[in-house]
Amino acid sequence: MSMRRFLLGVATALIAGPALAQQPAQAPVPGWAVGRPEGSTLAPHAPRLTVTPLSEVPVAAIRLPQGFQAEVFAHGIPGARTMAEGPNGTIFVGTRVIGRVYAVTRNPDGTTRVRTVAQGLTQPNGLVMIGNSLYVLAVNRVLRYDNIEANLDSVPAPVELTAAFGLPTEQEHGGNHHWKFATLGPDGRIYTNVGVKCNICEFDRDQFALLVSFNPDGSGRRIEARGVRNSVGMAHHPVTRELWATNHGRDWAGNDTPNDTLIRVRRSGEDHGFPFCVGDWRDPQYNAGRNCSEFAQPAALLGPHTAALGMRFYTGTMFPEQYRNQIFLARRGSWNRERLSGYDVLVAHLDAQGNVTRLEEFMTGLRDDANQKFLDRPVDVHVMRDGSLLVSGEQMGAIYRITYRR
């Protein structure tokens, strides 16, 4: 190389260098957007995290089968999601984005009072009551609040059980599917979920995409099901004691594929197929030649991208006989689908053998198909001791109460 060409190259680099240095760094792609087709504008719907006045809670829009009525049980609960009931009737409410846990109590005149009993937590979505103690699962943190109903106005510091449970951290999840759901099994164990750390990818199948259970002190970890991408709702059948759960399919595989699912766990450790299959649907990217018949099949398909979440078996006596021991489940609603789906509560009807015979649209009216808008997003359901059904609405920060009279 001649000296003239060398000096010219140095001069060019000196001129270009500052200009290149001034180029802004590209922001990292958020986990939900990985794999989004070029040109797509689909993105999650931002939750409303301020208090909604009672007059704006859309209870009048709710549609139910004949004989059922809906009312506002409580409001002013921004981000309301999962629910658990204490021995004295307090309804504890977990959240995700806002980081709070609420307590809802009834006043003598029938109105309700809302208190914030914990805040500043990272996605405290998982709640379960064991005796007088409230367990809060916030990503990998597990906190136990003892005798909480007697101390709602001055909640003592919780017992820290995080190390004992050893759940993956937010960083290990890469910010994906790390919020929890929790339920108490008939065996006295805490059952929860460990979502997958991506939209779809390769991962350690003993660490992610699981349903797991623990003794209440965090010992005795047991894998209940593998290949469960993102379950944020589960319950045990009141007669057979089998574990059932909702599960979310992957994103960015089309408007109508794959379905969200309702799964039935017949034996601990069985594999439900993620990322290879959803039922008989083979993932076009990650099937890896696997035969879908080698995996446990869904008990029911719940529609594409409907975001099926909280579920409970109806164990009350207020509703008609055909609802006893049937599954009520909330579908929070789609975001990565061009036309909205979900935003409702379904009933999965089971036969004597535990097979799903049909899905009934139970609570509708919150999805405006004509304008492609939604009025609220049902997240969880809870059967109260009087047999009524509570439904939490995250978008409006409200809890609806459904009753039946002949």
Image (cartoon, grey):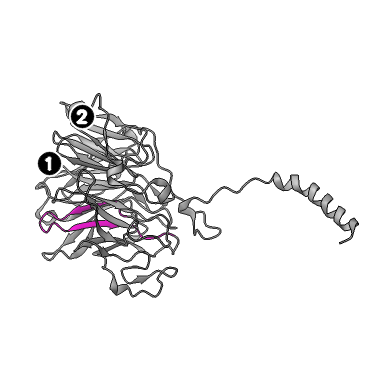
Q: Which residue carries the number 2 mark?
A: 111
The kind of residue on which mark 2 rests is Thr
Q: Earlier in the sequence, mark 2 or mark 1?
A: 2
The kind of residue on which mark 1 rests is Arg
At a point 40% along the width and 42% down the height, the residue shown is 47
Q: Residues within 10 Å of mark 1 (few under 14, many from 20)?
A: few
> What secondary structure is marked by label 2?
loop
Q: What range is drawn magenta here?
A: 231-251
- Assess whether residue 186 is covered by the magenta stretch: no
- Quarter occupied by residue 341: bottom left
Q: Position of residue 91 (x, y in %)?
A: 21, 36
As measured in the structure, the alpha-carbon distance from the residue carrying label 2 to the one carrying label 1 is 17 Å
The answer to whether residue 36 shows anywhere in this view is yes
Q: Which residue carries the number 1 mark?
A: 385
Q: Residues within 10 Å of mark 2 (few under 14, many from 20)?
A: few
Quarter of the picture containing the N terminus is bottom right
* Residue 289 to residue 139: above or below: below
* Residue 236 to residue 52: above or below: below
* Residue 124 to residue 339: above or below: above
- Quarter occupied by residue 240: bottom left
- Quarter occupied by residue 400: top left
> What secondary structure is marked by label 1?
loop
The answer to whether residue 81 shows anywhere in this view is no
Q: Position of residue 292 (x, y in %)?
A: 32, 73
